[in-house]
Amino acid sequence: MRVGVVSLGCAKNRVDTEEMLSLLSQEGYELTDKAEEAEVLVINTCGFITSAKEESIDAIFEMAQHKQTGKCRALVVTGCLAQRYGEDLMREIPQIDVLSGVTQYDTLAQAIDLALQKGERQINTQRKKAFLHCGRVLTTPNHTAYIRIGEGCDNRCAYCAIPLIRGSHHSRPKEDILNEMKDMASKGVTEQILIAQDTTAWGRDVGNESLKDLMREASGIAGIKWLRVLYCYPDGTDKALIDEMAAHDNICRYLDLPLQHASRKILRAMRRRGDIDEVKQLLAYARGKGFALRTTFIVGFPGETEEDFEELMDFVRDVRFDRMGAFTFSPEEDTLAATMPLQVPEEVKKKRLERLMSLQSQISSEQNQQRIGKLEQVLCTGHQEGRYIGRSSWEAPDADGLILFDADFPVKAGDFVKVEIRSADTYDLRGVAIEAMP
């Protein structure tokens, strides 16, 4: 029986999807990327903010149409939206045959079988803390994989529903992580990316270990050319971690530090830990070590005044992030921020976001201009409009810009080449491959 999957949301959700695909394939399901041919359709949903919820609901209804127009016999909804709103979804969308939360994928095949054989709708949103040992079917290119090192979050930021969905933080055992990474490397996965809701929380609940220790050991795995870490929490990141990353040639000098704001008043209201002046010093230290700096911000948080927003703008002007994402505050039910007074009007949020992104666009362009004339190691990821495309260690997949380059020798996806940067625009770079790299 053929199964098709739509995976929405973040890289952490992608890992869930890959484990789910592995489990279903082990049960004899044939995987297909053509929804019209699938007899079982799975939508792995995101429930982080309102726009993500809406995208997930739209995807459910779109895939449900294949019950009439295609071969679909079972519609399955999984993931964060399912975990949080399972009963509501089952009640409001009768086309759903099976609903599973974020930690029940090991029972998914059995639930699908019951739905198909007995016509019984199945729902299971009981959270578990165990990590699966089921292998993965990569949905990324063969040379890149995300490695989950933890689940859940203890930070309890005022705006965030993740703890309500994923529960409290628990670290994945180090042996499991390193074994998976070794297995991936043996299969040619040269870029491996450590992820969790808060990667810097790894190890705190399992003994005297830290992300720094994990990265040191992981960097020694044969075959890993690029080791990257995402989603570092500001007060869990220090100079010792930066130094450890800088000490290994195969660890990408790329610091992903989601800050959310720069106003002390707003950070306190967000229930974010850490001192913004210390964070600024840390960012300067990392830049001095040759790191690309990435962050995300929320604009329009309740109580944000024009003065608070200008404080954020000044911070961005001073730090000059190489990469920055931003979004407007979305009030999520059952979070503290949803009921806070002084909610910012949507039109004000939108205008502030436009101003912030306009500033960052200028900074990004200027930062890219400084890379013209430099030689950079580039991982080829494919072709686009007659040119090769790729990324340097300063560009994370699915988040940052691209490097487009020409080459007078054959290059395939997964190859590393040395590229001379010849021109730059706001987000992308262009250049010429000088030589292949081992």
Image (cartoon, rainbow, N blue to C red):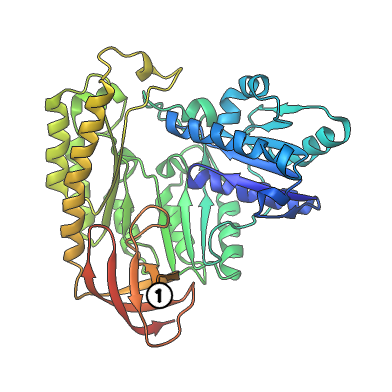
Q: Amino acid at mark 1?
A: Gly
Relative vertical location of residue 88 with respect to residue 316 in this rendering, above or below: above
342 or 119: nearer the eye?
119
Q: Nearer the viewer, residue 349 or 264?
A: 349
Mark 1 surroundings within 10 Å by alpha-carbon count, few (fewer than 14), some (14 through 19), many (20 or more) = few
- Label 1: state its secondary structure: loop
Q: Quadrant of the C terminus?
A: bottom left
Q: Is residue 294 visible?
A: yes
Work out whether 372 lies above or below 101: below
Q: Give the residue at x 21% y 62%.
A: 368
* Residue 145 % position (x, y): 52, 58
x and y percentages locating residue 42 in the rendered image: 66, 41
Hey, which quadrant is residue 181 in on the image? Answer: bottom right
Determine the residue positioned at 16% across, 45% down.
359
Q: 357 left or right of 230? A: left
Residue under the image location 56 percent in, 67 percent down: 185
Give coordinates of residue 293: x percent, y percent. Answer: 26, 52
Quarter of the image where one finds residue 187: bottom right
* Of the pair 188 and 82, the residue shown nearer to us: 82
- Residue bearing the label numbered 1: 386
One can see residue 281 in this view = no
Give percent across and percent down for residue 395: 35, 60
